[in-house]
């Protein structure tokens, strides 16, 4: 019989590499998607609150763009999102509506961003993963009361 001392460590290293490398990649990919999901959710929530507290539509638009940039920058993401306003309760793919600042108005703010998986060529990944953050806004019923 041959001496097999030292084979266990070689086998362990081989199996550990085969298991650990894909595991580390999956953790990195999930973290990337989760970071984007949290960022678009926060951006939608902040944009909705900004709409509801703005005085005019023009002011609301400027403030919302700044708030969305800030929410994405907090997670280290570029400002490459799609901002949509749809009817309350509608899916983010529905037709866009103009947000109303009238007392009691309701609408949903959607922030949509495509996530590219790390180290995967676009030929294999396709369009990536679509992260959507939605927040339904209810403008205060007593907004117009002095």
Image: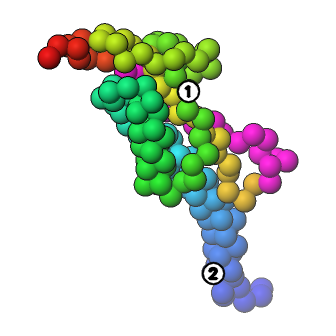
Observer-nearest of 69 and 126 = 69
Location of the N terminus (image quadrant)? bottom right
Rendered image: mark on residue 84: 1
* Residue under the point 43% across and 25% down: 57
To which residue does mark 2 refer? Answer: 9
Observer-nearest of 37 and 138 = 138
Location of residue 141 in the rendering, given as x and y in whole percent from the top left corner: 24, 11
Magenta segment boundaries in residue numbering: 121-137
Tell me: residue 1, above or below residue 46.
below
Location of residue 43 in the rendering, given as x and y in whole percent from the top left corner: 44, 39
Mark 1 or mark 2: whose residue is earlier in sequence? 2
Give the farthest residue toward the right: 123
* Residue under the point 14% across and 17% down: 146
* Residue under the point 34% across and 13% down: 102
Q: Tell me, yes or no, whether the two marked residues, 1 and 2, touch with CB atoms within 8 Å.
A: no
Tell me: residue 42, above or below residue 48.
below
Crowding near the residue tagged with mark 1, few <14, some 14–19, many ≥20 C-alpha atoms within 10 Å: many
Q: Is residue 34 visible?
A: no
Residue 130 magenta-drawn? yes
């Amino acid at each position: 019989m041959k001496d097999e001392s030292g084979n266990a460590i070689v086998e362990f290293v081989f199996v550990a590499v085969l298991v650990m490398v894909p595991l580390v990649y999956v953790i990195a990919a999930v973290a990337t998607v989760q970071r984007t999901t949290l960022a678009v959710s926060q951006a939608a929530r902040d944009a909705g609150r900004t709409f509801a507290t703005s005085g005019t539509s023009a002011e609301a638009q400027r403030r919302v763009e700044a708030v969305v940039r800030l929410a994405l920058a907090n997670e280290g993401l570029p400002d490459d999102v799609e901002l949509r306003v749809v009817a309350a309760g509608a899916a983010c793919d529905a037709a866009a509506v103009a947000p109303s600042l009238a007392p009691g108005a309701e609408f949903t703010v959607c922030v949509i961003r495509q996530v590219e998986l790390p180290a995967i060529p676009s030929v294999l990944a396709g369009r990536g993963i679509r992260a959507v953050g939605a927040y339904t806004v209810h403008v205060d019923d007593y907004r117009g009361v002095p």
